[in-house]
Amino acid sequence: MGKNLLKLSDLSTDEIIAILDRAQMFCAGVDVPVLSDKIACNMFFESSTRTQYSFNVAELRLGMRVVSFNPGSSSMNKNESFYDTVKCFDSFGPDAIVIRHVQNEYYNELLGHINAALLNGGDGTGNHPTQSLLDLLTIKQEFGRFEGLKCVIAGDISHSRVAHTNYEVMRRLGMEVVTAGPEEFLEKSLEQEDFDHAVKTSDIVMMLRVQHERHAEHMKLTKEEYHQAYGLTVEREKTMKDKAIIMHPAPVNRDVELADCLMECPRARIFKQMQNGVFVRMAALERAVK
Ligand code: CP
């Protein structure tokens, strides 16, 4: 059986660094294996552009054969369960299955019951391991290190699997990580800092999307009010350190958490993050099936 990738807290620091090193080799076009005897199934039960299709591109770059599952046209419409649907795909004999699902730790009911390596494309508000790996690769390319860097993660922290995954792994790698945003979006267990102070003192300003789809109630602030109070405005960007960068997992609500004109400004690494998503997913897939 291949190696699952469910959450980064399962991996040692050495294992994480090894995946990043391998991803950097793929970024340089070095030593790309041909895995044409391997089959991957992509099963996205929750909407996705970047994760779903960059896994697909990563699989193609590795020469793998790919089956993409569409829940909307499947027998889930006849009340087939999530478990039985994944078991069905596993019965076909793929080497790897990539899953995104709205349920936190959806994978627990599958462990021990499927033969393919399982790669987590995001579970509810829990974990998003390949997003954090691509964030780390982007930071490593920029600064050449993790130790001593400061990152503020700002916005809808409590609903963000990106925030939860990055907070743990970045601190483990020696970074200072603080959170900022509206009181109702923060978590007491995560270190908090005044947003304006954090923007001025951080090497990485990581903005998060307000996840309206995970909110029971509508946000009380208008988009403009949110932008002025908690968004990275043009004025706030001017206070950032000279070499500091802007990151965002995307999709971005332009002019809400991030000023429209900052999306592709010289500090922004948002499309670089998406590019790196292919390389870390190639590394994760190779690790899973070799
Ligand atoms: N960052 C991210 O996970 O984007 P998608 O939801 O489009 O996959």
Image (tube, rainbow, N blue to C red):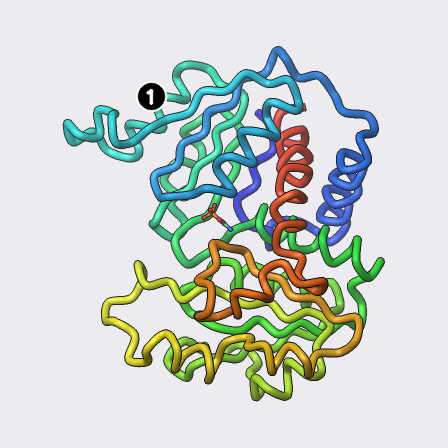
Q: Residue at x 67, y 50 (%)?
A: 272
Q: Residue at x 64, y 83 (%)?
A: 198
160 left or right of 5 in image: left
Residue furthest front in the image: 261
Question: In which quarter of the view is residue 73 placed?
Answer: top left
Whether residue 167 is visible, yes or no, is no
Q: Residue at x 57, y 41 (%)?
A: 5
Is label 1's Cβ within 8 Å of ligand 1?
Answer: no
Rendered-image quadrant of the C terminus: top right
Asked if 56 appears above or below 247 in the picture, the reply is above
Which percent across, then down, holds residue 170? 67, 64
204, 6: nearer the viewer = 204
Whether residue 108 is visible, yes or no, is yes
**Which residue matches tag 1?**
88
* Mark 1, other Cα within 10 Å: few <14 / some 14–19 / many ≥20: few
Amino acid identity at mark 1: Cys
Which percent across, then down, holds residue 20? 74, 45
